Amino acid sequence: MQYKSRGQQVIKAWEDFVSTPLDVLLNQHINTSPEKVLLNLFHDVAAHVPAYEAFLAANSIHPDSIQTFADFQKLPAIAKGNYISRYSLQELCRHGKIEGCDMIAASSGSTGKPTFWPRFFIDELQIATRFEQIFHDSFAAESKPTLAVICFTLGTWVGGMFTTNCCRYLASKGYPITVITPGNNKDEILRVVQEIGENFAQVVLLGYPPFLKDVIDTGIARDVDWQRYHIKFVMAGEVFSEEWRSLVGERVGSQNPCYDFASLYGTADAGVLGNETPLSICIRRFLAQNPEAAKALFKESRLPTLVQYDPVSRFFEVENGQLLFSGNNGIPLIRYNILDTGGIISYDAMLQFLADWGFNPLENLDQNSRGIHKLPFVYVFGRSDFTVSYFGANIYPENVTVGLEQPVIKEWVTGKFVLQVKEDEQKNWFLSVVVELAPDVEASEDKRQAIAASILTQLLRLNSEFANYVPKEYQTPQVMLAPMGDREYFPIGVKHRYTRK
C-alpha cells in the first residue's frame, strides 16, 4: 500500500508538471499566499521528521503554538552545526526513512567528509521549473532544437546529475532539448560541440563560470568558431562580474547578454533556490554601471549575485544579515541558515528603486516582455563562514592550514595566510594564497614552490569538491610569501582574517 501511495504521488506530480505551462504555474504561485504554504510545511515537518521533532522539543517549542507567520519567525534557525550534523540521515528524512528518497547527492565539509543530501523525484520536478524558466524565458527553447551540454562534474556531487535530470524532464515535457553529458572533460566538450552542435538551433553549456570560460578560450585557441553554434550559458556556484559576462559573450558572438546567460543560485542542501532572469540580469548590468545606485541598494561596495525566486517553492528570510530559507526536499528544511550573506527585495520595491534612479528595466528588454514575472529578488554575497568558492568548490581555510603544518614547511611559516580567488588580466580566475613567513626566514623560489605543492596535496586529499570540480591546470595555488607583520596582509595588533572576497 505504501508503494502504491508513493507511485500515485509520482504520477500526480508528473502529470501536473508536464501539463501545466510555465506562465500558468508561476501566476498560480504569485497569487498564492507563501506564508500559508510555509505554515503547512512547518506542521508537516514537525509531525513527520524525527530530527525536527527532537529539535523543537529540545528548544521547548510545541508545534501547536506556531499558528501565524509571526510565530514562525520566532522559531530558531537550523544549520549544519545545530541540526544536520546532530541527527542521523534517517532521522532527517520523513518518517525516519531514507528509502523514501530515490537519489542522494554529496557535498564536502571542511574535513573532506561528505554531507549526504537525499531527494525524491518530486523534489526534482520543482527544481526543473527553475530550469524551465531559463530554457523558456531566456533561450526560447520551446521552439528551438537545443543541445544541452552538461559541463558540471558528474558523480555524487549535486551539479551534474541534478542538472541532467532537470533537462531531461524538460525534454519529456515537450521541449526539443537533447542532453549530452561530457562532464568537466574539456576535450570531450569541444568534440561534442564541433561534431554535433550544428544539428541544433542553439547549444547551451551548463557549468561553473570559470570552467566555461576556459572551455571557450581553449576552443578559440583551437580555431573553434563559436558563433556557428549560437552558444548560451547556464552557470552556478560563483559570483562573477558583468565585465566577465560581457567578455565571454563577446567571445562567442552573444548579441544579448540578458537572454544568452542565466546563473543559478543553487546548493546541494536543497537544489536551486533562485535563478537569474532576463529582468534580473538587465538590472544587475545597470547597477554594475552605476556603483552609487548599487551601494544604495545593497549597502556594499561590491556587486552580489542577483536572482529572482518563487517563495512558494523556496521561502527566504533575512536574519542578522544572513539568508534563511525554508523548503520541501528529501531533507525538509525550516529556517535553514546556509551561511550566505545577502538580502531580499520585493518586485515592486525593486522597480520603484530603479525608477528613483531614472531606470526602467522593462523598457530595456526587447523580447516582448518575455521572462517578466512579478517574483521577488534575492541577492547573495556568498558564504560568511570564511570559505571561498572556486569553480563551484567550497575551499576552507582548514584545508590550507594542513598544508602549512607539514614537516619542514611548518618551520618556515607562522601559520597565517590569506586565501583569495582573483582574476588575472585575461579574466581567468586563480587561487591565491599569501603566506606569512616566520621571523628571520627569507623568501625563496624553492620555498614558494614547496609551499604551493604542499597546499595542493592537502587540498586534493581533504576536499573532494576541489579535486573533482577544479580542472588540473587551475588547481595549483599561486603562492606569495610575505614577511611577518606585512602591513597589507598581516598587520600586527589586528584580528587576522584568513579569507578575502
Image (cartoon, grey):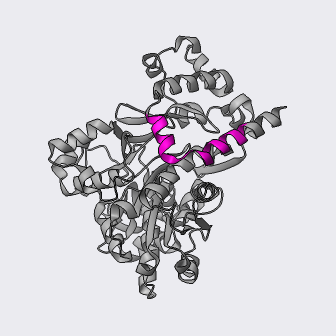
| Residue 268 at least partly seen | no
Task: Identify which residue, 257 or 450, lies in the foreground.
Answer: 257
How many marks the image carries: the answer is 0
| Residue 373 at least partly seen | yes
Left or right placement of residue 205 versus residue 321 in this view: right
Left or right placement of residue 187 versus residue 316 in this view: right
Q: Residue at x 55, y 47 (%)?
A: 127
Give the percent coordinates (x, y) of residue 309.
43, 42
Task: Identify which residue, 468 or 238, lies in the foreground.
Answer: 238
Dominant secondary structure (helix, strand or loop) of the stretch shown in magenta: helix
If the image is split into quadrants, where does the N terminus sit?
A: top right
Q: Which quarter of the figure has residue 324? A: top left
Give the percent coordinates (x, y) of residue 22.
51, 47
Q: Which quarter of the figure has residue 462? A: bottom right
Magenta run includes residue 198: no
Tell me the magenta residue range.
Answer: 9-30
Q: Residue furthest right?
A: 1
Task: Identify which residue, 111 or 314, lies in the foreground.
Answer: 314
Give the percent coordinates (x, y) of residue 251.
35, 76
Q: Residue at x 47, y 51 (%)?
A: 133
Q: Residue at x 62, y 42 (%)?
A: 16
Give the percent coordinates (x, y) of residue 202.
48, 71
Magenta run includes residue 18: yes
Q: Residue furthest bottom?
A: 223
Task: Identify which residue, 157 or 481, lies in the foreground.
Answer: 157
